[in-house]
């Protein structure tokens, strides 16, 4: 084993996780408002999946009210998986947005103001006529 360098000794190593607690909580919170059809219309595939999940859920409850329960479990399972797909897609999008915001904040924190200026040497040897 090699000895740690001075930089490694002064800066404690911090493990960064893809799924930090704050990021996941924010993503779960942000994934439910994304169920709005006006927001889903930006992504036509997920809009159709959401539309299918709404229609399947309506069919499930109509058949439940009518008392036709012979194949109701199948419609319920399909509705569940469609809703799960939409929620997971919204969650993944919220995670990506959260990571992007975190990276932008980290880059913003490293920015220095005023920007460093270039210094020119003014020695007599560099000035020749």
Image (cartoon, rainbow, N blue to C red):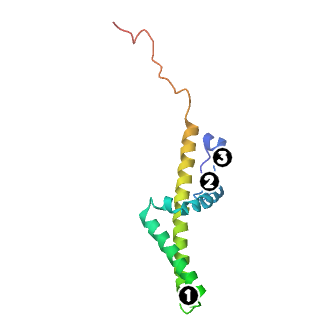
Q: Quadrant of the C terminus?
A: top left
Query: Compared to 86, does 108 lie above or below?
Result: above
Q: Position of residue 110 (x, y in %)?
A: 56, 37
Q: Which residue is mark 3?
A: 12
Q: Mark 2 Cα within 10 Å, few/some/many (few <14, many 20+)?
A: few
**Label located before the other in sequence (1 or 3):** 3
| SS at circle 3 | loop
Q: Position of residue 39 (x, y in %)?
A: 50, 58
Q: Mark 1 Cα within 10 Å, few/some/many (few <14, many 20+)?
A: some
Instruction: Quote the CA–CA distance across marks 2 and 1.
Output: 48 Å
Q: Position of residue 4 (x, y in %)?
A: 62, 46
Q: Position of residue 54 (x, y in %)?
A: 52, 73
Who's the residue at 55% across and 39% down the image? 108
Instruction: Give residue 92's mark.
Output: none
Q: Quadrant of residue 107?
A: top right
Query: Compared to 103, does 26 lie above or below?
Result: below
**Label located before the other in sequence (2 or 1):** 2
Who's the residue at 44% across and 69% down the image? 48
Who's the residue at 61% across and 61% down the image? 28
Front residue (pair 43, 4): 43
Q: Quadrant of residue 21?
A: bottom right
Task: Name the outermost residue toward the bottom.
Answer: 70
Query: Compared to 95, does 84 lie above or below?
Result: below
Q: Which residue is mark 1?
A: 72
Q: Quadrant of residue 43?
A: bottom left
Q: Which residue is mark 2?
A: 15
C-beta proximity under 8 Å, tags 1 and 3: no
Instruction: Quote the CA–CA distance across marks 1 and 3.
Output: 57 Å
| SS at circle 2 | loop
Q: Mark 3 Cα within 10 Å, few/some/many (few <14, many 20+)?
A: few
C-beta proximity under 8 Å, tags 2 and 3: no
> Between tags 2 and 1, which lies in front?
1
């Amino acid at each position: 084993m090699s000895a740690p360098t001075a930089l490694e000794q002064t800066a404690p190593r911090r493990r960064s996780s893809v799924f930090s607690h704050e990021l996941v909580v924010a993503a779960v919170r942000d994934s439910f408002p994304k169920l709005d059809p006006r927001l889903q219309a930006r992504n036509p595939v997920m809009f159709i999946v959401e539309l299918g999940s709404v229609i399947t859920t309506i069919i499930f409850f109509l058949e439940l009210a009518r008392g036709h329960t012979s194949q109701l479990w199948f419609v319920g399972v399909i509705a569940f998986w469609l809703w799960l797909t939409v929620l997971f897609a919204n969650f993944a999008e919220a995670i990506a947005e959260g990571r992007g915001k975190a990276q932008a904040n980290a880059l913003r924190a490293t920015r220095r103001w005023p920007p460093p200026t270039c210094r020119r040497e003014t020695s007599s040897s560099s000035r020749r006529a």
